[in-house]
Image (spheres, grey):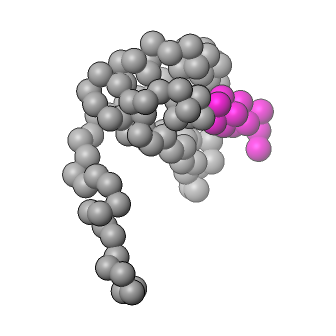
């Protein structure tokens, strides 16, 4: 893994861990690395309410991540706000004893 990828991966893992442990508004935080282009990452963040992303961006760990990865980006970061269609395990649960 190149130094840039390692740097992005390490900084993102620290940010995700701190977000999940310290921010009650963060429900889920996934980091996905593309198979076709391992230099590209996708961060999937799920928040409890509309204010949680704003609070997240005010946190010290977010600022540390933002500053750490800024110089490692090949292109500017982008983001999309996508509402959840299904929420919680019950939406996709397999019935007991079923496969």
In the rendered structure, the answer to whether residue 42 lies left or right of residue 92 reads: right
Query: What main secondary structure does the magenta stretch of the protein show?
Result: helix
Of residues 32 and 45, which is closer to you in this image?
Answer: 45
Residue 74 at least partly seen: no
At horizontal 65% and vertical 19% (from top left) the residue drawn is 68
Residue reaching furthest front? 96
Q: Where is residue 32? Give x, y as percent.
A: 54, 48
* Magenta segment: 1-15
The x, y position of residue 66, in whole percent, is: 56, 19
| Residue at horizontal 22 percent and vertical 51 percent from the top | 85
The quadrant where residue 65 appears: top right
45 in magenta: no
Name the residue at 25% across, 55% down: 86
Rendered view: 7 above or below 51: below
The residue nearer to you, when weighing 86 against 95, is 95
Residue 29 on image: x %, y %: 48, 40
Lateral position of residue 35 relative to residue 96, left or right: right
Comparing 13 with 7, the one in front is 13
**In this orientation, does residue 26 appear?**
yes
Taking the spot 26% from the left edge, 27% from the top edge, the residue there is 50
Instruction: Using the image, determine if residue 67 lies above or below residue 7.
Output: above
Q: How many marks?
A: 0
User: In which quadrant will I find the N terminus?
Assistant: top right
Asked whether, in this view, residue 20 is left or right of residue 9, the answer is left
- Measuring from the top left, give residue 28's x and y in whole percent: 44, 42
The quadrant of the rendering that contains the C terminus is bottom left
């Amino acid at each position: 893994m190149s130094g840039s990828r390692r740097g992005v991966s390490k900084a993102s893992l620290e940010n995700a861990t701190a977000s999940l442990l310290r921010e009650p508004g963060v429900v889920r935080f996934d980091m996905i690395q593309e198979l076709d282009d391992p230099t590209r990452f996708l961060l999937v963040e799920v928040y409890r309410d509309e204010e949680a992303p704003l609070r997240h961006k005010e946190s010290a760990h977010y600022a540390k991540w933002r500053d750490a990865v800024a110089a490692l980006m090949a292109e500017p970061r982008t983001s999309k706000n996508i509402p959840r269609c299904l929420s919680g395990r019950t939406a996709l649960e397999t019935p007991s004893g079923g496969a």
